[in-house]
Image (cartoon, rainbow, N blue to C red):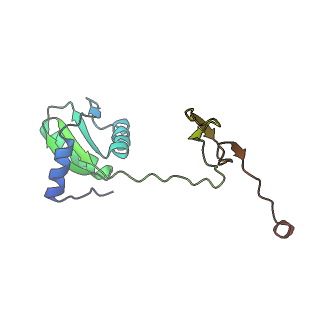
Amino acid sequence: MPQITLTPAQRKVHRAEAHHLDPLVRVGGEGLSPAVKKEIDAALKAHGLIKVRVFSDDRAAREGMLQTLANELDAAPIQHIGKLLVLWRPIPEKIKPIDEERMPGPRDVKVLKFSKRGGQRPEMKVVRVLGNQRLTSGGQVKRAKVMKKSIKKSAQ
């Protein structure tokens, strides 16, 4: 997968956003092992913009790691400063499955009941109404009526 190319202005914006971030992944003496690449990929999926700390004194090796990560993980190299590498990849949108049989959830409704005697305060009650229930104008909870199925449709 090729790495993402950004304009200098976009790179500047991402550098500014990454300034306050802490490194999420640390690369030790083993270098870029498959487990480290997997963790960096998971962090990019979750956060989009991450910092990686590399515990190596060789600047050329760190530069090579940045290019390797950018190429293999389809990310954009944002910055290499000291022992920190900054990578960015857009976060994929999460697809929510639509459940056709799902019913509406419960909701809490405030009901005011006025007294039959005029001088008293109205009583306020919080009533939980489930998805298959409705609230009458008098403040009572009634179960929803079951819809009758058509004889013609069931015969087909």
Camera-side residue: 146 or 134? 134
Camera-side residue: 116 or 128? 116
81 vs 137: above or below: above
| Position in image of residue 112 (x %, y %) | 57, 39
75 vs 151: above or below: above
In-image side of 140 versus 76 (left or right) = right
In-image side of 144 versus 96 (left or right) = right
Residue 65 appears in view: no
Q: Residue 110 sits in which quadrant?
A: top right
Q: Residue 35 sits in which quadrant?
A: top left
Which residue lies at the image location 27% right of the left edge and 32% below the top edge?
26
Which residue lies at the image location 82% right of the left edge and 66% below the top edge?
150
Residue 145 appears in view: yes
Position of the N terminus by quadrant: bottom left
In-image side of 45 versus 86 (left or right) = right
Camera-side residue: 119 or 1? 119
Instruction: Report how many numbered discs are placed on residues in the image.
Output: 0
Position of the C terminus by quadrant: bottom right
| Position in image of residue 123 (x %, y %) | 58, 33
| Position in image of residue 136 (x %, y %) | 67, 48
In-image side of 135 versus 84 (left or right) = right
